[in-house]
Amino acid sequence: MSRSHSPSIRMVASRAGVSVATVSNVLNGKASVSPDMVARVNKAVEELGYVVDIAASRLRSRKSLLAGVIVPDLTNPMFAAFVSTLEHLARVDGFDLVVVSARNDAAEEADRLANIRAWRPAGLIAIPCDGAFKSRLPAGFSIPTVLADRIPDHDEFDLVAVDNAAAAGAVARHLDEQGFRNCLVVGTRLSISNVRERWEGVQAAARQMTLELLEIGIDDPVGLDAFERRLRERSKPQAMFALDHGTALATYRIVAEMGLKVPGDIAFASFDDMEWMQLVGSGVTAVRQPVEAMAEKAWLLLSRRLAGEAGEPVTRRLRCAIEIRGSTARSAVSRGGETESLKREEKHGNQ
Amino acid sequence: MSRSHSPSIRMVASRAGVSVATVSNVLNGKASVSPDMVARVNKAVEELGYVVDIAASRLRSRKSLLAGVIVPDLTNPMFAAFVSTLEHLARVDGFDLVVVSARNDAAEEADRLANIRAWRPAGLIAIPCDGAFKSRLPAGFSIPTVLADRIPDHDEFDLVAVDNAAAAGAVARHLDEQGFRNCLVVGTRLSISNVRERWEGVQAAARQMTLELLEIGIDDPVGLDAFERRLRERSKPQAMFALDHGTALATYRIVAEMGLKVPGDIAFASFDDMEWMQLVGSGVTAVRQPVEAMAEKAWLLLSRRLAGEAGEPVTRRLRCAIEIRGSTARSAVSRGGETESLKREEKHGNQ
DNA sequence: ATGAAAGCGCTAACAT
DNA sequence: ATGTTAGCGCTTTCAT
């Protein structure tokens, strides 16, 4: 079945003609070892291609350089970037990461959460599927945890997220100032804090503009269908605001299928700035989220807890930037392919 | 530092008033245990929130339900989808995955490869950074391994990839038939097998069309600069073919910045079909790769090896589909926003 | 400076 | 059917 085992510390010891304790000391730079021993041990390690067994090491030393990461969906570019950044930071600090995806399924999240404990990670960084995160934690859960991006309905963990309401409000204000009189806001589900906060931000910021909300779920054919019917059967809104990447994609596709011109027939803005948004038509106005900064903050918060820092859970809000592009231009002279892009930093948020 | 330890099997045993062996037997469904014992053990497990320590379990049983996965870059949507699919398949088979990214860096790949061994995974699935994969394997590497997507300069491992040459050739033939007389082919580096094979496929298939190749690297400002100079300083090609997602994005951006109309001024095709390619202009003609199928095949191949299947390394090539869209239309009546999409399955490849 | 030996949490032999 | 015990690979006292 499995081929010859990997070399153990004992094989290294016998090859180097020393005790296993000495090998361990050399490997971990502990205690005082004579240069001669160090050389012999390193030679044996080299020749055998020895690598320590992390599991055995942790078992005995009772200290783990492992952190768990759970995200709702690895194929979401936002989360992929988050994990990628995290992975790099972790490595720099000597940590390994066990990464799991809940695949947008609360039940699967609960399952993974239970499973991840089997690895005895020192800490956990989680982007919850929805607000009911706590209810999916296994009984007796006691791993130092930092939540990111989505906010649960309780506050027992450190938390880092973006300033959704302020950024979404800035977009709404922009649309308002451009003179659009009504706006269809499209999100997945209000049970996701990001969507809820963005919607609330829009409501608080809109002045002249009347608002309408549509929840279409995540990759849900029924939701998409309702969306399309809404656009076809009732009077078209002057503007649309998609509250995340998935809905932005869906919205743009429907708009294209209906043959509507952006911004000539309808204006369009998105929360989440993806690369393609600079390329379509005259560009899509979008909120750019500081994903890397969020990952850095999350890792920092976790590091502190692992270093023993006590105290109440903290919440950090990160500021977003708004990219104003052609899709929300007031006068609709669509000069195909040309990008009139004007970058504006909105100042808002605490942090 | 770390809070109260997670409960051990001994605590479960004492709480249930049984021996640790019985607890282990209940947990693993081994041997014969009376219903009474099962109930008592499960109750104690529940109350304590006990989860087995995978590391200790593997240490003793000498069998590991862990597989390693290494990809060049997690933020590449192709690889993210690959990992996500893999993760699901692994879970179904009871496996955990330790996922690492090389961040497009050969040195980092070597580092991760060495590090991943510390986990003693039963098997490994790797998408190599480039052809010199073998040179980055640690001495004494003996983990059953399946390579995917990119082909190394040796053949000691099972391998699954797409039929690059055939698919790229089909695109070249299409461009040729559309009447374009010259084509600028843009790739990252020929040292990546995908790029090389696609370029060879194009060369083999083009008839009337003259070809020119440009290697621009991965996120390399110098390469981008050279690319832009090429377009500005010499006569524009009638068509361009980007050999992967990154170069497609770069190409499309430069085209937009130069104010060129697609396909009016220049035709454009891409290897890798991303969601936005249906949305820009009249759509981008693209090769759609079977990423999920590739992940499935890779997992299947690995499973077989883990089950003890011997024999020579096998290579599997998966067929791609071509999506013909407006960006390669012969007559350039660019009706902004309207998508004239015509799906065509190209039959080619073995497997 | 080096080594012998105990023991981390668990499973697999082997008793009973 | 259940319990006792050895030992997986490692680190850490504690002797020497």
Image: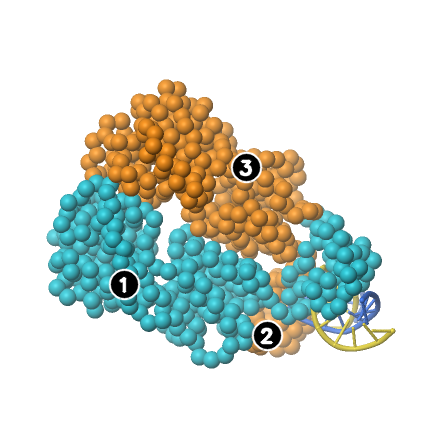
Chain colours: A orange, B cyan, C yellow, D blue
Q: Which residue is mark 1?
A: B346
Numbered tag placed on residue A5 in the rendering: 2
Closer-to-camera residue (A259/A325)? A259
Closer-to-camera residue (B205/A185)? A185
- Name the image quarter holding residue B80: bottom left
Q: Is residue A160 above or below residue A306?
A: above
Percent x, y for residue A45? 57, 71
Instruction: First in sequence, mark 2 or 3: give its number.
Output: 2
A150 left or right, relative to A185:
right
Q: Is residue B60 above or below residue B85?
A: below
B40 left or right, relative to A203:
right
A282 left or right, relative to C13:
left
Q: Residue furthest bottom?
A: B311
Q: Residues within 10 Å of mark 1 (few under 14, many from 20)?
A: some
Q: Residue furthest top?
A: A208
Q: Which residue is mark 3?
A: A151
Q: Residues within 10 Å of mark 3 (few under 14, many from 20)?
A: many
